[in-house]
Image (spheres, grey):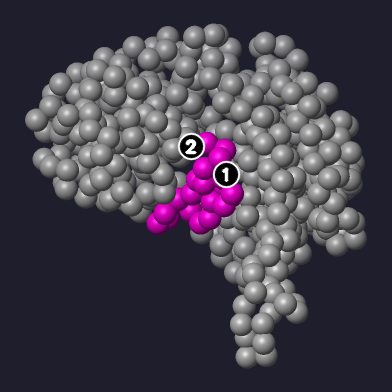
Amino acid sequence: MTAVESDSGVLAGEERMLIDGELVHAAGGAFFDVEHPASEQVAGRVTDGTVADMERAVGAARRAFDNTDWSRDVEFRYHCLMQLHAALDRNKERLRRILITEVGCPVTVSGSQIESPIEEVKHWAEHGRAFDYLQDNGVHETQLGPARRKLSYEAIGVVGAITPWNVPFYLNIAETVPALMAGNTVVLKPAQLTPWSGSEYGRIVAEETDIPAGVFNVVTSNANEVGAALSADPRVDMITFTGSTATGRAILAAGAPTVKKTLLELGGKSAHIVLDDADFSSALPLAAMMACVMSGQSCILPSRILLPRSRYDEGLQILAASMAAFPVGDPWTPGNMQGPQISATQRQKVLGLIQSGIDSGARLLTGGGVPENLTTGYYTQATLLADVDPDSQVAQEEIFGPVLTVTPYDSDEDAIAIANNSIYGLSGEVSSADPERALRVAQRMRTGNVSINAKSHFGISSPFGGTKQSGLGYRNGEQGYMEYLDIKTIGMPA
């Protein structure tokens, strides 16, 4: 049983992990607590896996890949993942309660973190079933005469997936399901702060699908060295990771001795360029909402607003009013769209960065502290900082909180230069009455993804990836599926 069986979400429980087809406790018998960030209470506990447990999980995944037909039987994989889709759908309210309990995600906005990834399981099952794994590359002339070349798309092997705490169930699915459908075996290491989304996923696989033992494994742990062991293990062929750029660098270093393939979605500091012809009355309230939804705990949310100096005061007034009115509170209460930060440590980081902005000359227009009516739980006021120096810490460092920084600009060229003044390049946005002008600006932004006039770039059918220090490789789209495949070129008689 999970710890979550009521709307309060605060009950005792002990979750197990999935290794080699069995739901087990850690080898050392230890557990660690899971906290509900809206109440600051311990909601339950989960088994605390060790390096030995991780080694056992990797060994199971290696054997399942090397010694079974999983990588070669597309129809069986399709069958298993359609089972998984149905099972997740049956369990979606249980998964939603887990999400709200361990993340503090408001029930109002939980659909994108529960229903959407469940439907993506079906998408990847159907996509993988239709994919042409043996493609004809045509006849080519060689020194020895014509040769027909075949391209064989084959599973990479054992994939280690390390997921973050901000959208745990969504990314547990996004990082593992396409890997499984492509024929790989998987070891999932969920984030320390949000282990239940992963352990429940493992339980569903074990109890409600025909996925064979060892094909999918989940190791929960409160120890950093367990994730590090997964990254460094020579039996692992690929690591997929979403999280901070600092951790991404460590994962690259750990995989370097074995030249391990690495798929990274890392930090972001996305800029929203609001051009001088934009409809401020529609663009700016939406920008304020995007900064606060999910408590600002998303790498793709545009957290830097660039306003034309000619309309600067007008824009600040709209943003300040919108952020001051944003509904923040108990995530179990419908209508609230901003819950708490994930932990006391994360809230302190957010408040510290706000103060650093003020210390560097930014004007605090609204927020900046803890809501007076929400002293229990790790809540932060929606915060607007104006006159932000684009080189300051608050403009350069990822905040992961409900904070918008605003910087004026004098021309389109100036706005583009400010937007590109970052080590990150994950996302961005442009608002304008002229779509062609907006497109010209978007094409000059050094970032992997841009939305124009709130038309989202993010979707299961389109590749998503970062430039600069925001990542390597792609999720979603045809490119995202092919990340989990190797290409073998076969020459044969024409």
The residue under the point 67% across, 19% down is: 97
Q: Amino acid at mark 2?
A: Phe
Q: Is residue 309 above or below residue 484?
A: above
Quarter occupied by residue 436? top left
**Marks 1 and 2, how far apart at CA:** 9 Å
Magenta highlight on residue 473: yes
Question: In the image, is 466 to the left or to the right of 106?
Answer: left
Q: Dot 1, crowdedness within 10 Å: few (<14), some or many (≥20)?
A: many
Badge 2 marks a residue whose secondary structure is loop
Of residues 292 and 420, the one drawn nearer to the viewer in this rendering: 420
Residue range of the region highlighted in magenta in the rendering: 458-480
x, y (%) of residue 212? Answer: 89, 45
- The disc, 1 or 2, on the residue closer to the chain's N-terminal end is 2
Residue 301 is one of the magenta-drawn residues: no
> Which quadrant would the N terminus be assigned to in this image?
top right
Residue type, mark 1 in image:
Asn
Q: Which mark is residue 458?
A: 2
Helix, strand or loop: magenta stretch: loop
In this rendering, would 476 be left or right of 429? right
* Residue 382 seen in the figure: yes
Residue at the (19%, 18%) spot, across then down: 317
Q: Which mark is residue 476?
A: 1
Q: State the image coordinates of residue 9 (x, y, percent, origin top left).
A: 68, 16
Marks 1,2: beta carbons within 8 A? yes
Question: Residue 197 is drawn in which quadrant?
Answer: top right
Which quarter of the figure is the C terminus placed in? bottom right
Q: At 48% from the left edge and 37% from the top edge, which residue is drawn?
A: 458
Q: Where is residue 175 drawn, in percent x and y?
A: 64, 45
Question: Residue 328 location in percent, x, y?
Answer: 44, 15
Please determine whether, in this image, residue 135 is positioned above or below residue 322.
below
Report the front residue among 135 and 239: 135
